[in-house]
Image (spheres, rainbow, N blue to C red):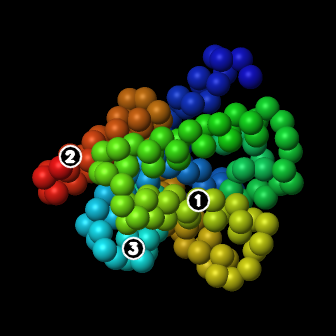
Amino acid sequence: MPISLRAVELLGCGLVPLNAKTPNCPMMLSTHAMVGAAIGTFCPSQIGLAAVLGFCSHFVLDAIPHWDYPIRSGSLTPGRGLPIRFDRALLEDLLTIGADGLLGVAAAIILFGFSWSVLLGALSAILPDPLQLVHDRLPHEPLLALQRFHRWIHSDKRMNLLPFGITSQLVLIMSVVVLTRATHHF
Ligand SMILES: [Zn+2]
């Protein structure tokens, strides 16, 4: 895809209302990871609690209108469940999503220090999005109920990347980092 077209796709051209046919697009995984990791710092000796709270935090963040990057491969688009097709779109999506998730988890560990609660909090906060893909291929309970809830709670407004989309996520991440580090006197 020409770079200019990709830019238009990323920037968008308005606050786009989602409808029932529009798939859930993920909020940046790094935002979810950072919030989940921050929660983990508050329950250092309760790994299970960190995982559960991290998982729940995903849905709270999804309920806030946000920017999310487009997913181009039908194989990775939640709600489509198309067969895996090894093409350029899949490769680009895997690189974008992988870098997003890995950077978020790595940055959280660098900023909050490693503990199993921090790691599990971050990973659990990301988990609901890949579970959407599992649901598309294995549409059974409890994934059916989880997917219904995920779609219901996900904001039906999508922000543009600029000026507020990326800014709001950066402000959220920075606020979480500053508050968490200040609370623990890191
Ligand atoms: Zn989500």
- Residue 12 visible? The answer is yes
Q: Alpha-carbon distance for marks 1 and 2?
A: 26 Å
Which quadrant holds the N terminus? top right
Q: Quadrant of residue 10?
A: top right
Say which label, 1 or 2, has the lower sequence index.
1
For ligand 1, tell me if the residue under mark 1 lies within 8 Å.
Answer: yes
Nearer the camera: disc 2 or disc 3: 3
Q: Secondary structure at mark 3?
A: helix
At 50% from the left and 49% from the top, the residue drawn is 29
Residue underneath mark 1: 129
At 48% from the left and 41% from the top, the residue drawn is 103
- Residue 57 visible? The answer is no
Residue underneath mark 3: 47
Nearer the camera: disc 1 or disc 2: 2
Q: Is 86 positioned to the left or the right of 53 in the image? A: right
Figure check: 12 above or below 24: above
Q: Label 3 near label 1: C-beta < 8 Å?
A: no
Q: Is 101 positioned to the left or the right of 48 in the image? A: right
Viewer-nearest residue: 2 or 123 = 123
For ligand 1, tell me if the residue under mark 3 lies within 8 Å.
Answer: no
Residue underneath mark 2: 178
For ligand 1, tell me if the residue under mark 2 lies within 8 Å.
Answer: no
- Estimate the x, y position of residue 162 in percent, counting from the top left: 43, 29
Viewer-nearest residue: 38 or 164 = 38
Figure check: 31 above or below 10: below
Figure check: 90 above or below 6: below
